[in-house]
Amino acid sequence: MPMKTMMGGLENLATGVLARRKRPYLMAHRGNRVLCPENTMAAFRQSFEDGAAILETDLHVTRDGVMVCIHDATVDRTTDGEGEVAAYSLEEIKLLKANRGFEGFESERIPTLEELAAILPDNVALALELKSDAFLDEEICRQLASILEDSGVRQQTLVISFSMERLRTVRRVAADIPIGLISLSSLFPSAEPEFVGVLWPMLFANPFYVWMAHRRGQFFCPLDPEPDSRLWYYRFLNCDSILSDNPAVTKRKLNQNVDE
């Protein structure tokens, strides 16, 4: 059976910012985190140059309520600092170098959502993973929606999370922003969100997962940041998007239809 029309805001993404992109859409995982330190402006810009159609990044909230792009709840792994993101003010967190493990990127700092939005190309969608329970607060979610609106990228954005409750909070205050639930172990797609993603081995445990999602008009992306050896399978399943740590290499393999 053919895929039903995508629900709500995701249909707007498909017919808007992604209209001239070919499926499966290439999604950059924290930017290009192979060539650059993850979730930095350098990684984001590199992913745009690589041809990514969607940029995925992670959001935490600082002590003074500023949304910043960082994966972990602490700054220890990716910066020269230590401690919880939520314990830092914006001014304090901006003093940290965000290039841990990468020479030549000493000027990189943890970006704010506004800083990212300011460089987002018109033809790139934005997938924001809500990493903190701060997003259970409706006021925080209103602030998120306001930042996206004021930055001119609201129509380019979807929010994703492992927490359905965080997504429901966004939905209550900004029903136009599409939501996506991701999972490490679900054998069946949740019926509620417009976007679903699951850790890639589950697609071998249930080869009908993508078909089931498409029956509801849901957008699907496997959670597989190193997808190149399985691109053949994702094409076979008709996945809507492919996640990658190194979008440049994955795009080349997708274009060549190579399985290595």
Image (spheres, grey):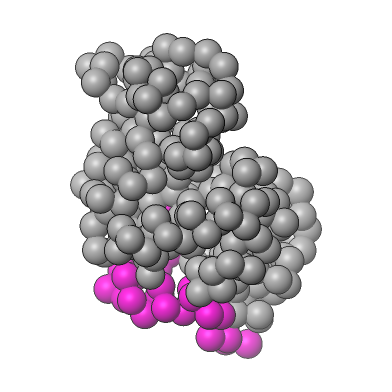
68 in magenta? no
14 in magenta? yes
Q: Is residue 47 visible?
A: no
State left or right for residue 199 relative to residue 7.
right
Q: Is residue 191 visible?
A: yes
Q: Quadrant of residue 165?
A: bottom right
Specify start and end residues of the magenta stretch as a single range: 1-29
- Please state which of residues 113 and 76 is positioned toward the viewer in this rendering: 113
Name the residue at 66% across, 81% down.
215
Name the residue at 37% across, 39% down.
112
State left or right for residue 69 relative to residue 256.
right
Name the residue at 72% across, 65% down.
189
In the rendered image, residue 24, in percent from the top left (x then y), is placed at: 42, 64
State left or right for residue 55 relative to residue 20.
right
- Please state which of residues 135 and 78 is positioned toward the viewer in this rendering: 135
Q: Quadrant of the C terminus?
A: top left
- Up the image or down, 199 lies above or below 141; here it is above
